Image (cartoon, rainbow, N blue to C red):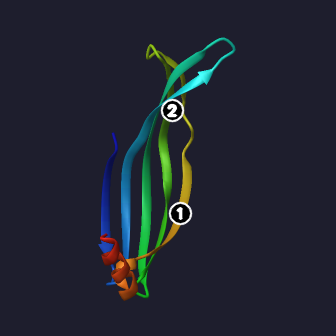
């Protein structure tokens, strides 16, 4: 189900920009407890996501990342055990932003020695 198209432009040796278009979602099963019985349900969620990201390597061992975009064309369907559609919900377009800091352990000598001892 997931499909993704990504483009990255390396600006300098330590900084790059990227863009992403993704069709994603999930399918999950769950049980709903009613007054008399357990009812099996299945949920199917789909969306299209557009993102722009920036990554920077700082001090050779840290990767800083910022990502932002919108999620649109969202659809959530709930089915019963006979695969009959019980409910369809279309949430609106929503913005999002994310940030992360990663420590790259194999870029420093102490981390590289630890990783080799662990066999990773």
Residue 86, given in percent of the width and then of the height, sits at 54, 18
**Which residue in the rendered view is the most extreme toward the right?**
35
Residue 114, given in percent of the width and then of the height, sits at 37, 79
Residue 111, given in percent of the width and then of the height, sits at 39, 81
Check the picture and name the quadrant holding the C terminus.
bottom left
Check the picture and name the quadrant holding the N terminus.
top left
Asked which secondary structure carries label 1, the reply is strand
Q: Nearer the viewer, residue 37 or 41?
A: 37
Q: Is residue 83 above or below residue 47?
A: above
Residue 101, given in percent of the width and then of the height, sits at 50, 73
Q: Which numbered disc, 1 or 2, marks the residue that appears first in the sequence?
A: 2
Locate residue 119 relative to residue 48 in the image: left or right: left
Q: Is residue 20 above or below residue 110?
A: above
Q: Nearer the viewer, residue 54 or 28?
A: 28
Q: Residue at x 54, y 33 (%)?
A: 90
Do the CB atoms of the residues marked 1 and 2 lie less than 8 Å apart?
no
Q: Residue at x 47, y 16 (%)?
A: 81
Q: How many marks?
A: 2
Q: Is residue 106 above or below residue 5?
A: below
Q: Where is residue 62, by image quadrant?
A: bottom left
Q: Which residue is mark 1?
A: 98
Q: Which residue is mark 2?
A: 76
Q: Nearer the viewer, residue 50 or 115?
A: 115
Q: Residue at x 30, y 77 (%)?
A: 116
């Amino acid at each position: 189900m997931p499909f993704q198209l990504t483009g990255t432009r390396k600006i300098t040796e330590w900084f790059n920009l990227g863009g992403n278009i993704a069709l994603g979602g999930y399918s999950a099963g769950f049980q709903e407890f009613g007054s008399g019985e357990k009812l099996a349900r299945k949920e199917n969620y789909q969306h299209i996501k557009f993102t722009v990201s920036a990554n920077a390597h700082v001090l050779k061992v840290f990767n800083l990342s910022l990502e932002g975009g919108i999620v649109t064309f969202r659809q959530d369907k709930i089915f019963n055990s006979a695969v009959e559609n019980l409910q369809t919900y279309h949430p609106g377009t929503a913005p999002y932003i994310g940030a992360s800091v990663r420590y790259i352990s194999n870029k420093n000598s102490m981390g590289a020695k630890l990783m080799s001892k662990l066999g990773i």
